[in-house]
C-alpha cells in the first residue's frame, strides 16, 4: 500500500483538492511485492476509466444508484464490456484475449446472451 503524506494548508478557505504531497510511505499488506514497483498509478488509472465510462461515479452528479445492487450490476457490465468487447490501444486486442481467457472479440449480444 502506498500512503501519500500531505502537508498542512495555510489557507483558511476550504479547497476542493488536497494539500501538497510532501512524501510517501510504502507498507506491505500481503505477499512479497517489489517495493520499487508499488504505485498508485494503476488503481488511479482504473478509477479514472470508471469515472469517464460510468456517469454514476462522476462527482457532483445525479446519476447515482439508489440501490447498491444496481450499482453492482452497472460495475459488472462495465468490466465485462471493458475486458471482452473493447479493443485497447496498447494491446491491440481485448484484455481477455491478451490473458488467453477468450480467443475472439465479444459483441454486446454475447454479454446479453449470458443473462438469458
Image: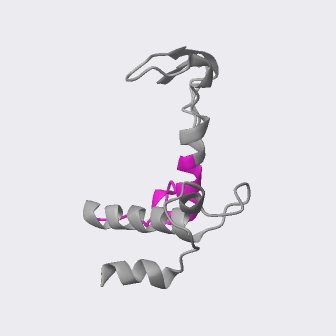
Query: Seen in the image, is 57 located left or right of residue 8?
Result: left
Q: Which colour scheme is used?
A: one colour
Residue at x 58%, y 74% (from the top left corner): 105
Q: In the visual, does 62 lie left or right of 100? A: left
Q: Is residue 90 above or below residue 64?
A: above
Q: Does the magenta stretch include residue 84?
A: no
Range drawn in magenta: 46-66
Which of 55 and 59 lies nearest the eye of the viewer?
55
The residue lying at 61 percent from left, 63 percent from top is: 94
Name which residue lies at 57% across and 32% down. 40
Query: Which of the 4 quarters of the picture holds residue 116?
Result: bottom left
Residue 36 placement (x, y as % from top left): 62, 19
Identify which residue is drawn at 45% across, 20% down: 32
In front here: 46 or 4?
A: 46
Q: Does the magenta stretch include residue 61?
A: yes
Q: In which quarter of the image is residue 52?
A: bottom right
Amino acid at each position: 500500500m502506498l500512503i501519500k503524506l500531505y502537508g498542512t494548508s495555510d489557507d483558511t478557505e476550504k479547497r476542493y483538492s488536497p494539500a501538497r504531497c510532501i512524501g510517501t510511505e510504502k507498507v506491505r499488506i500481503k505477499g512479497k511485492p517489489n517495493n520499487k514497483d508499488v504505485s498508485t498509478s494503476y488503481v488511479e488509472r482504473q478509477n479514472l476509466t470508471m469515472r469517464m465510462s460510468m456517469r454514476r461515479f462522476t462527482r457532483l452528479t445525479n446519476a447515482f444508484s439508489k440501490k447498491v445492487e444496481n450499482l453492482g450490476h452497472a460495475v459488472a457490465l462495465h468490466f465485462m464490456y471493458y475486458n471482452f468487447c473493447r479493443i485497447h490501444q496498447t494491446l491491440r486486442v481485448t484484455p481477455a484475449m491478451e490473458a488467453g481467457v477468450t480467443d475472439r472479440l465479444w459483441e454486446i449480444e454475447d454479454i446479453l446472451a449470458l443473462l438469458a
